[in-house]
Image (spheres, rainbow, N blue to C red):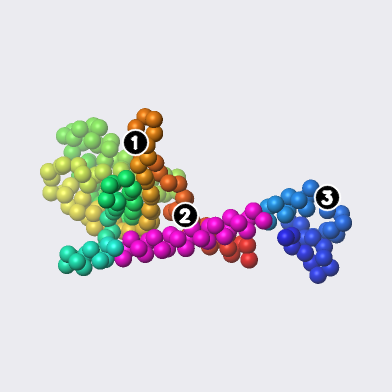
Amino acid sequence: MAKKDKDGNWLDDRGRPVPEQYIPATDKKRDKLVEATFKKVVKLAEKIAETKVEIVGSIDKYLDEIAKENRVRENWKGNILLQNFDKSLVIERRIDDHIGFDERLQMVKTIVDKWLSDRLDGIDENLGKVITQAFNVDKQGRVNTAMLMKLLHLEIEDSEWKKAMRMLKESIIVKSSKQSINFKRKVKKDSGEVWETIVLNFNDIVATAKKEKKDAE
């Protein structure tokens, strides 16, 4: 139902009172439709959020139990794949870390720059470009994390290079972690069995539900 003031006037988007008799019937019908639909959506989002909490709790409980049964101290930070007995249903749990680098990254760059300058004539041109570009920053001053991580996999047998890579690895910090859960099932179609993903927008629904509930209040 539309917001009203103490005199029963409808309040528009700027908070201005509008006497109900001047509001077109179409606006009243639209308002009723949107308000009713939104209540259903918020209720559904809250239910999905509650269900997600229950599912995550069940998965965590299962993982803790099998770790105890096998007498293993496990933090379960990696990706997990759970299947039913006939392997027709799959739950995929992923934990993705958003990483960055601390102040030691600047020292890594200094070491690498010197390493490159000492080998201007003895290093492959393409390799030199890859290394140099890895330390470039965008307009916001952000480094390319993926390119920097690739440097760790370069097989370069040199003490100074290895020193720089050790420091690069030690400079890595986890800024945040995001857990995502996906559900897949095997279904039969004319072309044969295929995997179907059940789309729930499950990984963002908690934040969405909380926000919508707050806005609705």
Quarter location, residue 196: top left
* Prevailing secondary structure of the magenta residues: helix
Q: Is 35 left or right of 46, judged from the image as shown?
A: right
Residue 46 part of the magenta-drawn span: yes
Mark in the foreground, 1 or 3: 1
Residue 183, x across and y down, in percent: 38, 49
Picture disc at residue 204: 2
Residue 162 picture location, percent across and down: 16, 49
Q: Mark 1 falls on what kind of element?
A: strand
Q: Which mark is residue 193?
A: 1
Label 2 vs 1, first from the N-terminus:
1
C-alpha gap between disc 2 and disc 3: 38 Å
Region of the chain picked out in magenta, as a range: 36-61
Amino acid at pointer 2 = Asp
| Residue identifier under label 3 | 24
- Report how many numbered discs are placed on residues in the image: 3
Location of residue 77 in the rendering, given as x and y in whole percent from the top left corner: 28, 59
> Do the CB atoms of the residues marked 2 and 3 lie less than 8 Å apart?
no
Instruction: Tell me what residue is drawn at x 23 percent, y 32 percent.
Output: 125
- Secondary structure under the numbered disc 3 in the rendered image: loop
User: Closer to the observer: label 2 or label 1?
Assistant: 1
Q: Is residue 4 visible?
A: yes
Q: Amino acid at mark 3?
A: Pro
- Closer-to-camera residue (36/181): 36
Q: Quadrant of residue 16?
A: bottom right
Question: Mark 2 or mark 3: which comes first in sequence?
Answer: 3
Q: Residue at x 17, y 64 (%)?
A: 70
Of the 4 image quadrants, the one containing the N terminus is bottom right
What kind of element bears circle 2? loop
As drawn, the residue found furthest toward the bottom would be 6
Of the residues shown, which amino acid type is indicated by label 1? Glu
Q: Residue furthest top?
A: 191
